[in-house]
Image: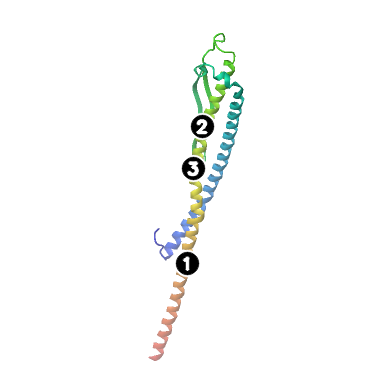
Amino acid sequence: MPKVKFTKNELKDQRDVLLRYKRYLPTLELKKMQLQKEVRKTDCLLSEKKKEENSIWEGLNAWIRLFSEDFDMGSYVRVKEVKCRTGNIAGVNFPVFEDVEIERSPVDYYATPPWVDDGIKVLERLIKLCIEITIYERQRELLSDELRVVSQRVNLFEKVKIPECIGHIRKIRIYLADEQTAAVIRAKIAKGKFLEVKAGT
């Protein structure tokens, strides 16, 4: 950290810096609030999707014996396209889930077990949920990273930079006031000595 100079120019510079910090801090605080709100919203969405996923898996317990049959149900389902757009909150870009396009191969109902159609529907739902959860987790990661950085900056301004600046201003003002007082005293002493010398002559 550069040493503070006890001059009027330094006092002006420190006041200007303090003004900039105080002007910038509310913007950072607003960004922090926006990010916190969005992280909470993403957490709620993640929680809902994970509950839905768990509910489907619990419902599949009754099907477990069917899945042990020698049948490749995954070959009937393929992810054709994941549709996302880019969202932006407080300058942070993140993926926003829109839809999953799934391509389904035709099922021969004479050559496959009777539960296959329902099984494929469940599999499609699980695939979609898995993709949604992955995207929401990425969204949360990006927002949380930015929130951490912004929170650090807010703390730096509030707890370090602004108090430090105020401290410098206070020290410089005290120093300049002391210098001014000392100058007045020196002037009075000099005047007194001058009058003594003058009176002596």
- Quick one: SS at disc 1? helix
Depth check: give the residue in front, 126 or 116.
116
The amino acid type of the residue labelled 3 equals Glu
Counting from the top left corner in percent of width and height, residue 131 is at 52, 28
| Farthest left residue in view | 201
180 relative to 197, above or below: above
- Quick one: SS at disc 3? helix
User: Residue at the spot x=46%, y=74% of the render?
Assistant: 181
Residue hosting label 3: 146
The amino acid type of the residue labelled 2 equals Ile
Counting from the top left corner in percent of width and height, residue 183 is at 43, 75
Depth check: give the residue in front, 181 or 150.
150
Disc assigned to residue 173:
1
Tell which tag, 3 or 2, sits nearer the viewer.
2
Residue hosting label 2: 135
Q: Earlier along the polypeptide chain: callout 3 or callout 2?
A: 2
- Quick one: SS at disc 2? helix
Question: For residue 41, which quarter of the picture?
Answer: top right
Quick one: quadrant of the N terminus? bottom left
Counting from the top left corner in percent of width and height, residue 95 is at 50, 33
